[in-house]
Image (cartoon, helix red, strand yellow):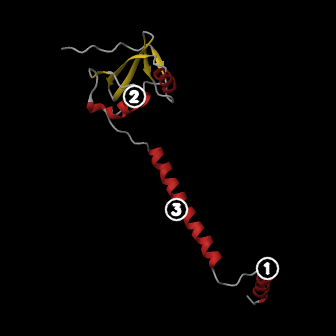
């Protein structure tokens, strides 16, 4: 038995607008359409097909994992949908790594480690039982040492 293929979407729809439409009950039908690389979402609103787009790129939003897509739709209150696997190829779905995020996390961890080290150094300094010398006394002490060094024969 051949599955009905979802119609081609004519309008783009971002998350904010889809959320509003789902909340107001204007979504009449939802189709999950397999694509090379993942799953796309098409919804029917007022007899027009809309496709969910990514907010940053404006391109079709693809979900790599079907479970993530189902959770996303359930979060919007959409729990009935048709699935079209015609163009889905699990071999083209690849997870991708974001080296920019890895670098940012590494920097955040390094910064946190430095902050901890610095706080420990400050605390150790505050707890140090050595006598404290005020600024003027330190200036006089080092001025005397400089004078002694200058007066030495070369």
Residue furthest to the left in view is 1
Q: Residue at x 21, y 14 (%)?
A: 2
Q: Which residue is mark 1?
A: 139
Residue 68: name its quadrant.
top left
Asked if residue 2 lies left or right of residue 124, the reply is left
Answer with mark 1 or mark 2, whichever residue precedes in sequence: 2
Numbered tag placed on residue 113 in the rendering: 3
Residue furthest to the top in view is 47
Asked if residue 142 lies left or right of residue 113, the reply is right
Q: Quick check: 126 above or below 116?
A: below
SS class, disc 1 = helix
**Which sits in the foreground, 133 or 140?**
133
- x%, y% of residue 14? 49, 24
Q: Characterize the local packing of mark 1: few (<14), some (14-19) or many (20 or more) Cα atoms within 10 angstroms.
A: few
Quarter the C terminus occupies: bottom right
Q: Quick check: 10 above or below 34?
A: above
Q: Which residue is mark 2?
A: 73
């Amino acid at each position: 038995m051949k599955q009905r293929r979802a119609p081609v979407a004519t309008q783009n729809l971002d998350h904010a607008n889809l959320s509003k439409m789902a909340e107001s009950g204007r979504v009449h039908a939802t189709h999950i359409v397999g694509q090379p690389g993942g799953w796309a979402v098409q919804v029917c609103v007022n007899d027009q097909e809309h496709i969910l787009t990514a907010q940053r790129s404006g391109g079709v939003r693809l979900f790599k994992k079907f479970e993530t897509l189902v959770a996303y739709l359930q979060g919007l209150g959409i729990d009935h949908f048709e699935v079209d696997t015609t163009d889905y190829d699990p071999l083209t779905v690849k997870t991708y790594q974001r080296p920019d995020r890895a670098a940012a996390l590494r920097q955040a961890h390094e910064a946190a480690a430095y902050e901890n080290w610095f706080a420990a150094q400050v605390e150790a300094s505050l707890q140090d039982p050595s006598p404290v010398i005020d600024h003027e006394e330190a200036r006089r002490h080092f001025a005397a040492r400089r004078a002694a060094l200058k007066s030495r024969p070369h």
